[in-house]
Amino acid sequence: EVKLQQSGDELVRPGASVKMSCKASGYTFTDYAMHWVKQSPGQGLEWIGTIIPLIDTTSYNQKFKGKATLTADKSSNTAYMELSRLTSEDSAVYYCARGTSGYDGTYYYDYFDYWGQGVMVTVSS
Amino acid sequence: NTVMTQSPTSMFISVGDRVTMNCKASQNVGTNVDWYQQKTGQSPKLLIYGASNRYTGVPDRFTGSGSGTDFTLTISNMQAEDLAVYYCLQYNYNPRTFGGGTKLELK
């Protein structure tokens, strides 16, 4: 069974950083990309970026460059996201999601097929 | 960035209704659109990929269609368990962008 287990909720001070984890199980970690998605309170979804653990390559939404840093530890099948210089605008739920992509001869497909349970980050003094 | 505009933002529906919601891209994204369902307090779940392909285990009452800039998700026989917010997502351009969501509520 594929599972993405995220770390616990965080209460952090403005200006601080936070690092959250996403531990993957039930599949070969290096065979898939890992994406991160932000959901602000009562709001929709924003794609933050992705990491390909096999080659440690990252791609970011320009909006989150300098804010989010994505890493992966192949030895523990865990992806990480660090958010820096936190403000109230960073208070949100953050999800990791496995990315599956390919080409079936007719079309290219790309989707998030498994999601973590989310980490709620609250930025408050 | 590619803006994905969903309409309507909310719908009041009854069990058994046929529900149609729309997603319009600000530029041509081909068929590179997925649909996700998010129930209250839960993580999003994949319903449709590549605009019209039902993901494994998704009931056949869910149908996706469209290409280019206009996409539709249809629920043919609404069930109470389908109450949720539905999001489209384009992955044709970086950054990937979600629509604002369509919320289904009971009349």
Image (spheres, rainbow, N blue to C red):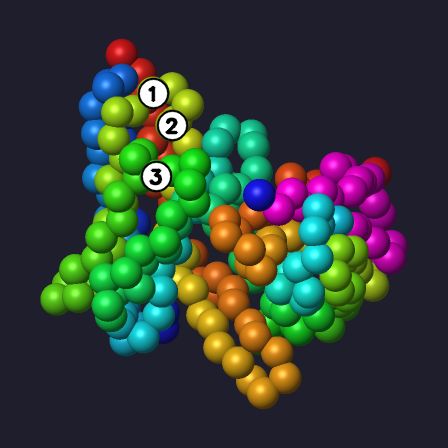
The residue nearer to you, when weighing A57 against A70, is: A57
Residue wearing tag 2: A90
Residue wearing tag 1: A87
Cα separation between marks 2 and 3: 13 Å
Q: Are marks 1 and 2 on the same chain?
A: yes
Closer to the chain start, of discs 1 and 3, is 3
Closer to the chain start, of discs 2 and 3, is 3
Q: Residues within 10 Å of mark 1 (few under 14, many from 20)?
A: some
Mark 1 touching mark 2, by CB under 8 A?
A: yes
Q: Amino acid at mark 2?
A: Asp
Using the image, name the chain to which the residue with label 3 belongs: A
The nearer-to-camera label among 1 and 3 is 3
Tell me residue B80's x, y (percent): 72, 52
Cα separation between marks 1 and 3: 15 Å
Q: Are marks 1 and 3 on the same chain?
A: yes
Q: Residues within 10 Å of mark 3 (few under 14, many from 20)?
A: few
Residue ID at (21%, 29%) = A17
- Quarter residue B62 falls in: bottom right
Specify start and end residues of the magenta stretch as a single range: B2-23
Tell me residue A71's x, y (percent): 22, 52
Res. B19 visible in picture: yes
Residue wearing tag 3: A65
Q: Which mark is residue B56?
A: none
Residue, far right: B17
Residue, far bottom: A105
Residue ID at (56%, 32%) = A43
Cα separation between marks 1 and 2: 6 Å
| Residue A38 vertical position relative to residue A49 in the rendered view, above or below | above
- Quarter residue B58 falls in: bottom right
- Find out whether residue A122 is within the magenta segment: no
